[in-house]
């Protein structure tokens, strides 16, 4: 939900104050060196163009360039589910001129999924802030018998292993949400992994595999056109984009899993530089036009301080690590 400029301005100031306290500042706000930044910044997205974090990164990079009066160049470094670009990024100088815009599937899931990701999400990076989170939505083909979440869960419970759900591959978020549903509610579906989101959704839209957990931005137009039926969202609360669709936690206690997009600095970046990047990002996020662009993507805005972001990252690493282990998924 888009907040008013006045309310968010007050919230941003409180968050900035919390940040400076968290960095050990004794009096006043942390002050970045007066000459930072004096040159171009690079924002790395460790995934291909067109993905949620790529689109969000381009919006934020453009706004930060205006705020800093320096160009901010976004560079895509895809490969190995985000591992290649992330591992390459950690080797840059920790001076605030290289930033990482990434998602929790890379930072929290991949370390448990891959034998060697090439980076440590905690030791190699400093959380700056989460820009927002993207709900996943449980969708079915319109021909599927269940019309509501209640009917769906009753049908799955009564027929363990009978129904199939599609995912973008083993260990992906839309695979692990099915594993989580099984763990928390005792439901059992057969997992059908695909090599990417596009072929998975093509078969769901065609009815070959009737069920999927899809990111809201990728499925919203199909839902509105009646090509998919939305039964539940994975966030703790209902999505403003689908207010009549229940949150799955309403019927499966504890069920929550979303894709967040967050901004990181490299480990060793001076605290005052982290503070300045955070302050600039908070300022950018106050702009109604920026908020609208992000919420139009299906993003639910988040305003974590670095300290709050770190807590969320640590919790996600533990949570998704356990779910990956339960799924048995591994990638060499």
Image (tube, rainbow, N blue to C red):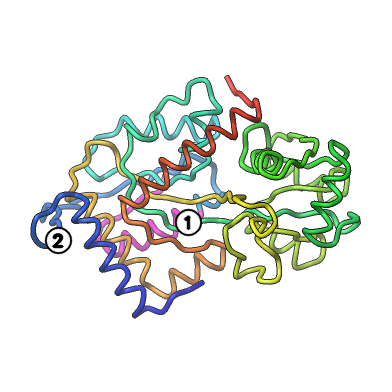
The local crowd at label 2, few if under 14, some if 14 to 19, many if 20 or more residues have their Cα within 10 Å, is some
Secondary structure under the numbered disc 1 in the rendered image: helix
For the residues bearing labels 2 and 1, Cβ distance under 8 angstroms:
no
- Residue 305 relative to residue 213: left or right: left
Residue 260's spot in the image, x, y percent?
50, 51
Q: Main secondary structure of the magenta part?
A: helix
Viewer-nearest residue: 95 or 229: 229
The local crowd at label 1, few if under 14, some if 14 to 19, many if 20 or more residues have their Cα within 10 Å, is many
Residue span colored magenta: 55-75
Q: Name the residue under label 2.
A: 29
Q: Of the numbered discs in the image, which one, if any, rests on residue 295?
A: none
- Residue 308 relative to residue 258: left or right: left
Viewer-nearest residue: 121 or 293: 121
Q: Mark 1 points at which residue?
A: 56
Residue closest to the far left: 27
Q: Which residue is drawn at 42% across and 34% down?
A: 86
Residue 317's spot in the image, x, y percent?
47, 37
In this rendering, the label closer to the viewer, 2 or 1: 2
- Residue 103 relative to residue 151: left or right: left
Residue 73's spot in the image, x, y percent?
36, 49
Viewer-nearest residue: 39 or 88: 88
Where the C terminus falls, by quadrant?
top right
Residue 11's spot in the image, x, y percent?
32, 70
């Amino acid at each position: 939900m888009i907040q008013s400029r006045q309310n968010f301005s007050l919230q941003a100031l409180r968050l900035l104050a919390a940040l400076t306290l968290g960095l050990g500042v004794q009096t006043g706000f942390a002050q970045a060196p007066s000459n930072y930044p004096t040159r171009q910044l690079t924002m790395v997205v460790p995934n291909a163009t067109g993905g949620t974090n790529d689109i969000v990164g381009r919006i934020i990079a453009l706004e930060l360039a205006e705020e800093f009066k320096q160009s901010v160049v976004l560079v895509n470094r895809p490969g190995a589910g985000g591992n290649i670009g992330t591992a390459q990024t950690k080797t840059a100088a920790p001076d605030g001129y290289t930033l990482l815009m990434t998602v929790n599937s890379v930072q929290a899931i991949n370390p448990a999924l891959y034998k060697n990701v090439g980076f440590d999400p905690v030791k190699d990076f400093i959380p700056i802030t989460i820009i927002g989170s993207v709900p996943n939505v449980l969708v079915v083909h319109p021909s599927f018998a269940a019309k509501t979440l209640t009917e769906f869960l009753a049908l799955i419970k009564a027929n363990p292993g009978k129904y199939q759900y599609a995912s973008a591959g083993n260990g992906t978020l839309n695979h692990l949400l099915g594993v989580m549903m099984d763990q928390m509610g005792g439901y059992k579906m057969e997992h059908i992994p695909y090599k990417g989101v596009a072929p998975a959704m093509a078969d769901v839209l065609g009815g070959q595999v009737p069920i999927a957990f899809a990111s809201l931005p990728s499925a919203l137009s199909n839902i509105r056109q009646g090509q998919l039926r939305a039964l539940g969202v994975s966030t703790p609360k209902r999505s403003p984009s689908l207010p009549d669709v229940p949150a799955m936690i309403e019927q499966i206690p504890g069920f929550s899993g979303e894709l967040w997009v967050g901004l990181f600095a490299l480990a060793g970046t001076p605290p005052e530089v982290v503070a300045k990047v955070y302050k600039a990002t908070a300022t950018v996020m106050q702009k109604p036009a920026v908020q609208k662009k992000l919420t139009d993507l299906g993003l639910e805005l988040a305003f974590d301080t670095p300290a709050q972001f770190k807590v969320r990252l640590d919790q996600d690493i533990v949570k998704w690590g356990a779910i990956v282990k339960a799924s048995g998924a591994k990638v060499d």
